[in-house]
C-alpha cells in the first residue's frame, strides 16, 4: 500500500510552504523526500520523490510513499528560502 503525501498531509495545509516571518506562500520551492534511514543524504543516496510548489505554496504533484515508513521532507529554494526539514511517517 502507498500513502498520498502533499501539502495536505496528514491534515489540510500541514505541509503548505509559507514564509516563516510573513506567513505568505512561497512559490517554486524544491521539495525532496528521503527515507529517514538514509538522511542526511550522502553522495550515494538519492531522494525517493520530488516536486515543487506553485504560487500558493501548494505542492504541484503529490508523492505516493510506501506505508509504514519514516520520511524526511526537505524544502529548499536558493537564496530566498531557508532550507527546512519535516519528519513524517506513513
Image: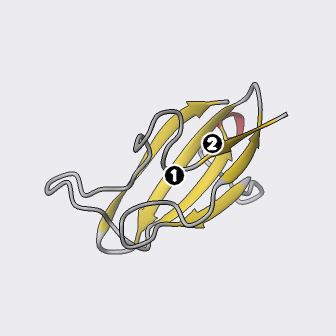
CB atoms of marks 1 and 2 within 8 Å: yes
Q: Which residue lies furthest to the right in this view?
A: 1
Task: Point out residue 39 in the picture as x, y percentages from the top left corner.
Answer: 63, 42
Give the mark nearest the N terminus, 1 or 2.
2
Say if 79 sits above or below 88 in the image.
Answer: below
Residue 1 locus on image (x, y percent) = 85, 33
Q: Residues within 10 Å of mark 2 (few under 14, many from 20)?
A: some
Total residue callouts:
2
Quarter placement of the C terminus: top right
Mark 2 = which residue?
39
57 with respect to 23 (left or right): right
Is 81 left, or right, of 61 in this rendering? left
Q: Is mark 1 on a helix, strand or loop?
A: strand
Separation of marks 1 and 2 at Cα, in angstroms: 10 Å
Question: Residue 74, which numbered label?
Answer: 1
Q: Where is residue 15 in the image (x, y as percent from the top left)?
A: 44, 46
Instruction: From the viewer's perspective, tell me whether residue 68 is left or right of residue 20.
Output: right
Q: Which residue is drawn at 64% across and 55% down?
A: 62
Which residue is rendered at x = 63% and y = 50% of the image?
33
SS of the residue at dot 2? Answer: loop
Given residues 83 and 26, the one toward you in this image is 26
Q: Is residue 7 above or below residue 29?
A: above
Please identify the quarter of the rendering in which residue 4 is found: top right
Amino acid at each position: 500500500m502507498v500513502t498520498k503525501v502533499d501539502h495536505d498531509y496528514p491534515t489540510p495545509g500541514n505541509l503548505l510552504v509559507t514564509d516563516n516571518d510573513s506567513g505568505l506562500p512561497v512559490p517554486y520551492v524544491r521539495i525532496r523526500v528521503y527515507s529517514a534511514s538514509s538522511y542526511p543524504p550522502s553522495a550515494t543516496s538519492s531522494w525517493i520523490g520530488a516536486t515543487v510548489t506553485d504560487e500558493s505554496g501548494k505542492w504541484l504533484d503529490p508523492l505516493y510513499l510506501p506505508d509504514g515508513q519514516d520520511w524526511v521532507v526537505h524544502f529548499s529554494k536558493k537564496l530566498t528560502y531557508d532550507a527546512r526539514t519535516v519528519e513524517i511517517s506513513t
